Amino acid sequence: MSSPAPQPRPASRLGPVSALSTARLSSVRAGAPPADQQDETPEPLVGALQELVFTVREAENLVVLKTLRGAAPMVAGAIDDAMIAPIVATVAGNDTVLAITRSEVAGGIIARYFRSLAGVGPRRARPVTSSRAGTAAFSDAAHDEESG
């Protein structure tokens, strides 16, 4: 006997948006999304990104969000609840959220979208001298400042 197919979430639980489409997100360039998209972004997502996220980076189809300590599960939950179509899954640690997208192109688009909502720019990793000879480590300057 096969298990029943998953049922879609009731409309009342979806909030203002059921899903942001890849086509609409692809129009996001280096700045904020078009005005008509800003109204469709769920308020909990905007609030979580603005209040809790301080860097957003992408690596191919992965988007990494650095958050205040202990805030990553809240940010990941807000991303999941927004049901953004190109995002396959999120993984939350203590201060880091990993959003996995369907493609490298989607990763770049989502990273720019999150940066525009959070009001942050991309941060560059800087080399840091490692205690082991001949090796180099990389550190996020903003995270170092926040940590200590």
Image (cartoon, grey):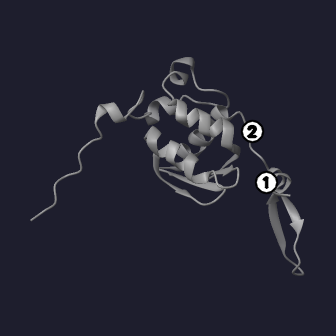
- The residue where tag 2 is placed is 121
Is residue 84 visible in the rendered image? The answer is no
81 in relation to 59, above or below: above
The disc, 1 or 2, on the residue closer to the chain's N-terminal end is 2
Badge 2 crowding class, 10 Å Cα cut-off, few under 14, some 14 to 19, many 20 or more, is some
Residue furthest front as drawn: 70
103 in relation to 21, above or below: below
Considering the image in quadrants, where does the C terminus appear? bottom right
What amino acid type should be assigned to the residue bearing mark 2?
Answer: Gly
- The residue where tag 1 is placed is 143
Residue furthest bottom as drawn: 133
85 in relation to 128, above or below: above
Q: In what element is the residue under mark 1?
A: helix
Q: Position of residue 60 (x, y in %)?
A: 59, 53
Q: Nearer the viewer, mark 1 or mark 2?
A: 1
99 in relation to 51, above or below: below
CA gap, disc 1 to disc 2? 14 Å
Q: In what element is the residue under mark 2?
A: loop
What residue sits 54% from the left and 28% below the top? 27
What residue sits 51% from the left and 33% below the top? 25
Q: Position of residue 123 (x, y in %)?
A: 78, 47
* Left or right of residue 58: residue 24: left
Q: Quadrant of residue 18?
A: top left
* Left or right of residue 87: residue 75: right
